[in-house]
Image (tube, rainbow, N blue to C red):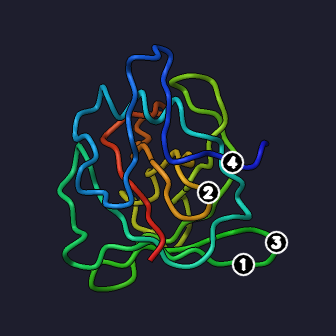
């Protein structure tokens, strides 16, 4: 998979349709249509680039728990990258793996929660992540696996702490 090399300004299929991804995430769009275009234009990240803490900002689909310190913490575990979420306490352990987005058949990093320490409900989460700014800003699609099919729930951002 190619390493994520992207500038801050992203250009879509149509030259007149430009979106700026600012350092201040509060001005990002909050609609699925625009976020889908941003996700499709984002680069495929390298799993090895994930490490440390990232704030999680839910943009659509679910409430945003950033004010409660919602973070994902990534670390090496053997020869793979794993991690967990923190919202007041540790929950939702995951592993990273290479995958393909069902939306556009292009590569993504999958945050896979199918681990023994997770609840039955958490085990079904499959986040698909792409890179907006190498090493410090990623866009993700929160997906839920039900009866063998992925259902899209909403978009989120990961920004390095």
Callout 1 crowding tier (Cα within 10 Å): few <14, some 14–19, many ≥20: few
The disc label shown at residue 5, or none: 4
On the image, the x and y values in percent for residue 146 come to 40, 38
The disc label shown at residue 38, or none: none
**For the residue labelled by badge 1, is the local secondary structure a helix, a strand or a loop?**
strand
- State the separation of the CA atoms marked 3 and 2: 22 Å
- Whether residues under marks 2 and 4 lie with C-beta atoms below 8 angstroms apart, the answer is yes
Q: Is residue 111 left or right of residue 100?
A: left
Q: Residue at x 58, y 46 (%)?
A: 7
Nearest to viewer (mark 1 / mark 2): 2
Callout 4 crowding tier (Cα within 10 Å): few <14, some 14–19, many ≥20: some
Callout 3 crowding tier (Cα within 10 Å): few <14, some 14–19, many ≥20: few
Which of disc 2 and disc 3 is earlier in sequence? 3
**For the residue labelled by badge 4, is the local secondary structure a helix, a strand or a loop?**
loop
Question: Which is nearer the eye, 151 or 32?
Answer: 32
Which of disc 4 and disc 2 is earlier in sequence? 4
Q: How many marks?
A: 4
Residue highlighted by disc 3? 79
Residue highlighted by disc 1? 77
Which of disc 1 and disc 4 is earlier in sequence? 4
**For the residue labelled by badge 2, is the local secondary structure a helix, a strand or a loop?**
loop
- State the separation of the CA atoms marked 3 and 4: 24 Å
Q: Is residue 61 above or below residue 83?
A: above
Which of disc 4 and disc 3 is earlier in sequence? 4
Question: Which is nearer the eye, 6 or 139?
Answer: 6
Nearest to viewer (mark 3 / mark 2): 2
Q: Is residue 39 left or right of residue 3?
A: left
- State the separation of the CA atoms marked 1 and 3: 6 Å
Q: Residue at x 57, y 32 (%)?
A: 101
């Amino acid at each position: 998979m190619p390493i994520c090399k992207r500038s801050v300004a992203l250009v879509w299929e149509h030259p007149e349709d430009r979106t700026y991804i600012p350092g201040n995430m509060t001005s990002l769009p909050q609609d699925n249509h625009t976020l889908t275009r941003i996700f499709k234009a984002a680069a495929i990240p390298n799993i090895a680039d994930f490490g440390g803490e990232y704030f999680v900002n839910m943009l659509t689909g679910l409430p945003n728990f950033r004010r409660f310190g919602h973070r994902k913490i990534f670390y090496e575990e053997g020869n793979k990258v794993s991690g967990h979420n923190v919202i007041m306490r540790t929950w939702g352990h995951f592993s990273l793996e290479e995958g393909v987005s069902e939306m556009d058949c292009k590569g993504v990093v999958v945050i896979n929660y199918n681990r023994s320490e997770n609840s039955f409900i958490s085990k079904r989460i499959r986040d698909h992540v792409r890179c907006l700014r190498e090493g410090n800003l990623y866009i993700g699609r929160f997906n839920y696996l039900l009866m063998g099919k992925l259902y899209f729930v909403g978009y989120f951002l990961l920004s390095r702490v």
